[in-house]
Image (cartoon, helix red, strand yellow):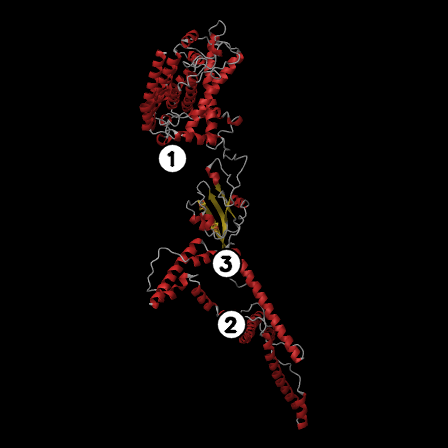
Amino acid sequence: MTVLTSTTALAQAPSILDVGDGVVLPILLKVALVLGLFFVVPLVGGYLEHKVMGRMQNRRGPVEAGPFGSLQLVADGIKFIQKEDIIPRAADKPMFALAPGLALVPALLVFLVIPLGPGVFAVDLELGLFYALAITSISVLGILLGGWASANKFSLIGGLRAGAQLIAYELPLIITAITVAVMAGTLSLVGIVEAQANFTLPGLEGFNLWFVFPQIVGFAIFFVAAMAELSRPPFDMPIGDSELVFGYMTEYTGIKFAMFLLTEYAGMITMSALMVVLFLGGWQILPGVATPGCEGAAGIMSCDPIGIAISVLVTLAKIMGLVFLMVWARVAYPRLREDQLQRISWLVLVPLSLANLAFVTILTVVL
Amino acid sequence: MAQTSLPGTGLLKGLAVTVKHLFKRPATLMYPYERNELAPRTRGVIALMDENCTVCMLCARECPDWCIYIDSHKETVPPAKEGGRARTRNVLDRFAIDFSLCMYCGICVEVCPFDALWWSPEFEYSEYTMDALLHEKDKLREWADTVPPPPALDEGAEAPAEVTEAIAKAEKELEAAAQKEADKAAAAEAATTEAKAGGSGPKKADEPKVAAGEIDQETYDALIAEGKSERIARSKAKAAYVKKEKARLKAEADAGGGDAEAAPTPKAADIKVEAGQIDQETYDALIAEGKTERMARAKAKAAWVKKEKARLAAEAESAAGAGAPAGEEAEPPSPTDAAGSDQAPSTDAPAEEPAATRKLGDVHVEGTGEIDQETYDALIAEGKSERIARAKAKAAWVKKAKQAKLDEEGGA
Ligand code: SF4
Ligand code: SF4
C-alpha cells in the first residue's frame, strides 16, 4: 500500500536542528525549542482561554498587563514566584515538594516528539506516539502524590478522583490513538502526518483526506478523553472547587501551585498537538493542498525556510483552534458528577473506541 | 418538542448560546477610566452636617454595629433676656464613623431627626490600614459637600408631604388675605352707601357714634324762648342733638345693611381674627392712665380682637338673613347622593349596603361572579381600575338580583 511505503521511507526523519558536525549545538537548539514551546505556547493558550472565556461570559478578560492584557499570565507567574511557599506541618514534605515537578516534567517531555513542521521537532522517535501517551500518563502520579502528601482530606479525595478519572479516560484515549496508528501504519508522529497527506479512501483515489474525516468518531472520543485527562471543565471533578476546595491543589501555594497550573496549560497544548498530528493533518494547510515552498512527498516535506515557517504557523493555528474548542466546552457545560463521569468513560467511550478499533483493523487487513 | 428528543441537541444549544455571547459587547465598564453615573441615593459614604447635629445620640444607639462614636459636653447658654432662665446645650466634640465596621445599612441616616447625616455617593476611600477607615468629624463634614441634591420627582408623581403642606399653607394665607380684602370692600361699600344717604362727612359705619359738641338748634331756640338759662339750653340742646343723630344713623345703618348683604360674607364658623393688630383707642386710653407700654399693647391687642370678632359676627348675622339660598345649597347634596345611589346601583356599594340590607337582607341570591355590566362600564368610564370596577359591579349585580327577587315575591 502507498501508505506503508511512504511511512517507511520517512520514519525517523532528521530534524532541521541537527546542524553542523558538533554534538553540543544541536542539543542546545533542541533544548531551546522544547523549552520555548513549553513556556511560550501554553501561555498563549492560557491567554486565549482567559480572553475567550471572558468574552463568552460578557466580560473582557485581562486588559491591564501588556497590550490587551497579553502578559497577564507572565505577571501571574511573577506573582506566584513572590508568594510565600507554605508547606502544611502534617504534610509529607519531600513528596509534597516532589509532586508538582513530577506532574510538570512529563508535560515538558512530550514536547520532545511533537512535530510542528517539516523537520521542526527535537526527535522523531520510531515509537513517538507510544512515547507521548506513556509519558503523559506519568503526570497522574504527580497528582496522586500531591493529593496524598498534602495531609488534607480534600486534597486526598481530589487526588484519588484524579487517579480514577485518568485511568478511566486513558483507555479510550490510547485505543483511539492505536486506531489511528493502524490506519497510518506507523507510530512515528512525523510518519502519521505524512501518512495523512497521502491518505485516500478506497474508491476515491486522488481525493486526499485527513484522518478526522473517516475517524470523526475517533476524533470525538479522543477530544473528550483528552479533556478528561487534563481535568479540564466539564471534567474537573478532581478540582471541583464547590466541593473539594481546589482538590489536589488545595494546599499548594506560590511557585508549586504555578507548576500545577502550567502543567494543565501545557497539557492542553500537548493534547491539542497530538490531535493535530493524529487527526488534523499536522502542518498541512488543507487536505490535498501542498504547502508553498515545499516539494517533498505530498507537498509537505523538504521545505525552504518560508515553507517551514508556514507549516509551523499552520500547526500552531490548529493547536489554538483546538484550545478554543476546549475553552468553548468549558464555558458551555457544567461540571459532571463523579458517577456520570465514570459512566461516560466505561459505558460509552471504551466500548465505542474498541468497536472503532476492531472496525478499522478489519478494514485495513481486508483492503 | 421533537428537537429535544434528539440526543446531543442540548449540548449543541449550549455551544450556540456561548458562541453567541462571544460576539456580544462585553458588559464590562472600564472602571478607573470610565465611570458609571451613580444613583443619587447611592450608599457610598456617610456625610455629617455637624452644625445640624444636636448630639441626640439616636444614630449611635441605633447603629447595629456600634461603629458611631460621639463625644460631647454641655454648655450653659446665658438667658436671652434679663430675668430669663439659663439653658444648657450639647456641644459636639467628636463624631466618628468606623467604616471598617459599618455595613452601610443606612439606619443612622434614616434615624437622624435633624438631617445631620446624609448619604454621599463617593466610594473611593479605600485605605492601606484599617484604622484609616475611622473617619472623624472633619472628614465626615467634608463628605457633606459631595451630597447631591435629591433627584427630581417622576413625572406625575405626588408632591412630597412638606411641599403640599407648604402650598396649602400659602393658599390659606392668600385666601385669608382675599377675605380681608372682600371685608374691606364690603365695609367701604357700606360706608359709601351711608355717605350717599346721609350726605354728612365720612363716618365709620360700624360705630354709631356721634361727634359731641354740636347742639340741636331747634331745641336750643325753644328752651331759650321758654326762658331757660343759656347754659341749660345749650346742654339740653346738645343731648337732643345726640339723640336725634343716633336715631338717624341707626336708620341709615339698617338701610346700609341691606346693601351689604350682596357682598360675600364669611361663614359664622370662620370668624377668625388675625392677631397682631391693636385697638388704638384702648391703647391710648391705657397709656394715658399711666400703664406700661407693654401692658397697654397687650390689652389693646385683646381689645382689637374682641372688637373685630364682634364686628365680623354682626356682619355674618346680617348675611345669614339674606344668605338663605346659600344655606340651602349645603343641604341638597345628601338627597342627591341618596337619589343617585338609588338610580345607578351602587357607585359606592359599601356605603349603601346597610340601608339596602334592611329590606334585602332576608333575600338570598345565588351568584357565580356575575357582574352588572352597566355599573362596570360606568366605573371604567370614570377611570376606575379594572379590579375595583369588577368588584363594585359584582356587588351591584347581587343587589339588583336581590331587589328583583324581592319584587317578585312582593308581586306574588
Ligand atoms: S450605615 Fe453604618 S454607621 Fe450607619 S447605622 Fe448602619 S452600620 Fe451604623
Ligand atoms: S441622630 Fe443626628 S442629631 Fe442625633 S446625634 Fe446622630 S447625627 Fe447628631
Residue kind at label 2, given as amino acid type: Gly
Badge 1 is on which residue? B1
Q: In this rendering, which labeled residue sits more in front, label 2 or label 3?
A: 2
Callouts 2 and 1 on one subunit:
yes
Give the mark, 2 or 3, whose residue is nearer the N terminus: 3
Q: Which mark is residue A268?
A: none
Can I make out residue B258 in this image? yes
Closer to the camera, B319 or A106? B319
In the image, A194: left or right of A292? left
Closer to the camera, B403 or B269? B403
Residue ID at (44%, 27%)? A328
Badge 3 is on which residue? B87
The answer to whether the residues at label 2 and label 1 have Cβ atoms under 8 Å apart is no
- Percent of width and height locating residue B343: 44, 65
Badge 2 is on which residue? B327
- Percent of width and height locating residue B311: 56, 74
Q: CA distance from mark 2 to mark 1?
A: 76 Å
Mark 1 secondary-structure assignment: loop
Mark 2 secondary-structure assignment: helix
Q: In this rendering, which labeled residue sits more in front, label 3 or label 1?
A: 1
Q: CA distance from mark 2 to mark 3?
A: 54 Å
Quadrant of the snapshot with the N terminus of chain B: top left
Whether B18 is drawn above or below B259: the answer is above
Decide: few, some or many residues near mark 2? Use Cα within 10 Å; few <14, some 14-19, many ≥20.
Answer: few
- Percent of width and height locating residue B391: 40, 56
Whether A235 is drawn above or below B159: the answer is above
Can I make out residue A92 in this image? no
- Percent of width and height locating residue B221: 68, 91
Subunit of mark 1?
B
Residue kind at label 3, given as amino acid type: Arg
Whether B137 is drawn above or below A11: the answer is below
